[in-house]
Image (tube, coloured by chain):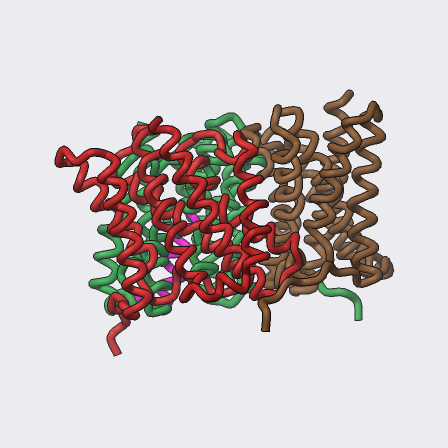
Chain colours: A green, B red, C brown
C-alpha cells in the first residue's frame, strides 16, 4: 500500500518531467527520437541518481512500465503540443510538479533506507534538481536551477517542513501533501511574482 | 568463450572511442595529458554508466588492460594523427564504430543480467551515447547527439533488430553482426547522405 | 587511527573545495541557497564518484558531519568573502588544496579496496578533478581542467610518485605528505609561472 503510493507518485513525476523534456526538445527543433531521449533522461535522471546514492537498484531498470509511460507521454505531448502552450508557462508548470514530487520521493526513499534527516533533504534536493539540470544541459540551455528564481531553495525548505512535521503526530499522508504544496507553492509564487533571495556580492 | 567475445568487442570499442577522443582533444590544442584524459573518459564513460546501471563492477576497475590499451591508443593516434586525417571524416568513423559496439555490448550485458528487452535497449543506447556526449562536453562542443543527423536513433533501431532476431532461431553471433551492421550503416548513411528525421515544431 | 587520518584529510578537502565553490558562486551573483548548492556539489561530487567507482557506500550519505561542515564553511566563507580576496588567487589556492587532498584520498581508498596501482591513479585523478569540473559547469564557466595550465597532469604525476615511493620502505605518512606536496607544488608552480605542456597539433 505504502509502496503503491510512492510508485504512483513516481509515475506522475516521471510524466511531468517527460512533458517538460518534450517541450524543451521541441523548442530546439529535435527529431522524434531526440525528443524521446531528452524526455527519457529528464524523467529518469533524478531517480537514477537517487537510487545510486541510496544504493537501491535503479528503479526504471526493474520495471518496464517506466519506459512505456515515457513513450506514451512523448506521443501524447507531441500530438497536443499546441494545446500545451495555452497553459501559462507550461514548461515551468510541469517542471515544478516534477520537482515537488521528486523531492518528496527522495525524502521518503532515503528516510526508509535509514538515512538521517539532513542527508534525506540533501538527497531529495539533488535528486529533484538533477533531471532538470540534465535536460537543460542536453538542450544547451543555462540550467534553470541557476536562474535567480527560487528553485533548489524550495526543495530544501520543503524538506525542512517534512521533518518538522514528523516531530508532531501528523499522519504521513498529510505530511506528504503539505510538503508537496510547500515546494510547489514556493516555486510557483517565486516564478509569478519574480521573487528572489538577495544575491551576495563582494564589497566594491 | 562467450566472455572473451564480449571482452574483445569491448576493447575494440574502447580503442575506437579513444581515437575519437584524441582527435577531438588535438583539435582543441590540448597538451598530452589533456589528450589522454579526454580519450580515457570518452572510451570508458559509457562502460562505467552501463556497469553502474546493471549493478556490475565497473569493468575498467577490474582489469588494468583497459588503461594500457588507452595509453597505447593515445600514443599511436598522436603519432599517426596526420595519417588519420586522410580517412574521410575520421572522427565520425571512429565514433560510429564505438557507438555500434557499445550499443551491442550494452544490449548483451543487460540481457545476461536478466533485464527485459526494452530496458536492454535503453541501457545500450544510453551507454553508447554517453562516451561521445562527455567527450563533446569536455571539449566544449555541442554534443554530436544533438546534431540533427540520426545518432541515438540508430542505437534504438539496432536494439529493436537485435531483439526481433532473437524471436527466430538465429545464432547469437549472427545477431550480433547484423545488429552492428544495422547501427553502423544507419549512422554512416545518415552522415554521408545527410539524412535526418523531420523535426517537430510548434504550430505557427 | 588510519581511518581517522583519512577522515580528517577528507574533511579538509571538503572545506577547501566548498570555499572554492562559494567563491565561484558569489562571482556568479547567486543567492545564499545557490551558493550552498554549488559548494555542496563541488565538495562532495568527487568523493561521490570515487565511492561509486570503488563500490563503497557514498561517504557523505553515512555521516551527517559532512553536511554541517559544508554549512559552516559556506557561512564562514560568505562572511569573510572580502578577506578571502586578499589571498592571491584565492580560488586557485583552495581548488589546489582540494585537488591534492582528493587525489591522495582517492589513491588510498582505491588501494585499500584492492585495486592495482594504475587503476588507483586513474581513480584518484578522476575523483580529484570531478568536483572542480562540476563546479565550473554549474557556474557556466569553461572547466578549469581544460585551461592549458597543468591540472590533471599534477594528479597523475602525484600518483606515480605515490606508488614509486611504495617500492621503498618509506613510512606511509611520509608518502602521503610527499604526494600532497608534489601535486600542490606542481599545480601552484604551473599557475604562478604559467607553465604549460606543449600542445599537439595537426601538421599544417
Residue C176 appears at what percent x and percent y? 80, 33
Instruction: Give the residue drawn at x 46%, y 44%.
Output: A103
* Quadrant placement of the N terminus of chain C: top right
Specify whether C123 is left or right of B84: right
Q: In the rendered image, is residue A134 in sight?
A: yes
Which secondary structure is most common in the magenta stretch? Answer: helix
Q: Nearer the viewer, residue C159 or B32?
A: B32
Residue A111 appears at what percent x and percent y? 49, 30
Q: Which residues are magenta?
A: A87-101
Whether the magenta-drawn stretch holds residue A97 is answered as yes
Relative to residue A192, is residue A42 depicted above or below?
A: above
Q: In the rendered image, is residue C72 in sight?
A: no
Relative to residue C192, is residue A204 depicted above or below?
A: below
The image quadrant that residue B123 belongs to is top left
Q: Residue furthest top?
A: C1
Instruction: Give the residue drawn at x 43%, y 57%.
Output: A135
Q: Nearer the viewer, residue B102 or B111?
A: B102
Q: Nearer the viewer, residue B92 or B140?
A: B92
The image quadrant that residue C92 belongs to is bottom right
* Quadrant placement of the C terminus of chain C: bottom right
Whether the magenta-drawn stretch holds residue A175 is answered as no
Amino acid at each position: 500500500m505504502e509502496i503503491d503510493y510512492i510508485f504512483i507518485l513516481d509515475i506522475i513525476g516521471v510524466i511531468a518531467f517527460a512533458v517538460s523534456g518534450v517541450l524543451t526538445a521541441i523548442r530546439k527543433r529535435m527529431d522524434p527520437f531526440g525528443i524521446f531521449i531528452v524526455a527519457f533522461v529528464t524523467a529518469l535522471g533524478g531517480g537514477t541518481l537517487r537510487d545510486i546514492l541510496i544504493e537501491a537498484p535503479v528503479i526504471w531498470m526493474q520495471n518496464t512500465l517506466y519506459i512505456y509511460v515515457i513513450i506514451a507521454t512523448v506521443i501524447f505531448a507531441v500530438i497536443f503540443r499546441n494545446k500545451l502552450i495555452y497553459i501559462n508557462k507550461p514548461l515551468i508548470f510541469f517542471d515544478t510538479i516534477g520537482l515537488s514530487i521528486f523531492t518528496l520521493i527522495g525524502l521518503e526513499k532515503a528516510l526508509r533506507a535509514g538515512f538521517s534527516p539532513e542527508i534525506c533533504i540533501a538527497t531529495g534536493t539533488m535528486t529533484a534538481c538533477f533531471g532538470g539540470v540534465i535536460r537543460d544541459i542536453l538542450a544547451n540551455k543555462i540550467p534553470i536551477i541557476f536562474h535567480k528564481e527560487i528553485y533548489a531553495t524550495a526543495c530544501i525548505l520543503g524538506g525542512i517542513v517534512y521533518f518538522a512535521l514528523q516531530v508532531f503526530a501528523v499522519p504521513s499522508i498529510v505530511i506528504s501533501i503539505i510538503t508537496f504544496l510547500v515546494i510547489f507553492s514556493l516555486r510557483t509564487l517565486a516564478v509569478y511574482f519574480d521573487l528572489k533571495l538577495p544575491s551576495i556580492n563582494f564589497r566594491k
